[in-house]
Image (spheres, rainbow, N blue to C red):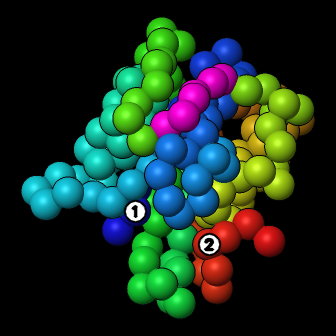
Amino acid sequence: MICGVLAVHQDKILLCRRAIEPRYGLWTLPAGFMENGETMADGAKRETVEEAEGVAENLKLYALFDLPNLGQIHAMYLANLQDGKFGVGSESLECGLFSPDEIDMENLAFETVKQTIEHYLADKAALEKLGKDSDDFSNYPLHEICIETHLVK
């Protein structure tokens, strides 16, 4: 089980540039394998600390990806990045907060990351169009997706 976080601060998304294989040098959301004894949310929080030295708060399960070719499930959460503070963890070359127009979708490491960001941006726009609070994660739907590959095409 892979757990990750789309952490936001002031309409910007936290991304990390990978310092490890696979997909060295490409951008990703903080994410990684769960450890024994932790919940999915705890794993997502831990990965945010390890990869970006940030604290994810107000987590809401947002996307579940079934990857049958890998025998994996990826659980992605929406969260606030506490105080907008982050650093660079040992598994990252650099980290940053990016506005949607600054994100190069072709330089994302994994298809699950790309689809999580795409769903978030579409859902955020739809909520704003309806006059709903896009900062309240309870307004966002849960996405359940089956994909055959996790690499960006």
Q: Are marks 2 and 1 in contact (CB under 8 Å)?
A: no
Q: Amino acid at mark 1?
A: Ile
x%, y% of residue 139? Answer: 61, 40
Q: Is residue 75 visible?
A: yes
In this view of the protein, can residue 29 be seen by the observer?
A: no
Q: What separation in Å lies between label 2 and label 1 (alpha carbons)?
A: 12 Å
SS for tag 2?
loop
The residue that disc 2 covers is 150
Where residue 83 sits: x, y (%)?
48, 9
| Quarter of the image where the N terminus is located | bottom left
Q: Amino acid at mark 2?
A: His
Which segment did they paint magenta?
92-97
Toward the viewer: 112 or 41?
Answer: 112
Question: Dot 1, crowdedness within 10 Å: few (<14), some or many (≥20)?
Answer: some
Q: Which of the two residues, 94 or 14, is positioned nearer the viewer here?
A: 94
Q: Return the x and y of residue 99 as percentages of the image width and height.
A: 78, 26
Image quarter of residue 54: top left
* Residue drawn at x 50%, y 44% as measured from the top left: 19
Q: Which residue is mark 1?
A: 2
Quarter the C terminus occupies: bottom right
Q: Secondary structure at mark 1?
A: strand
Residue drawn at 58 percent across, 53 percent down: 24
Above or below, 45 relative to 95? below
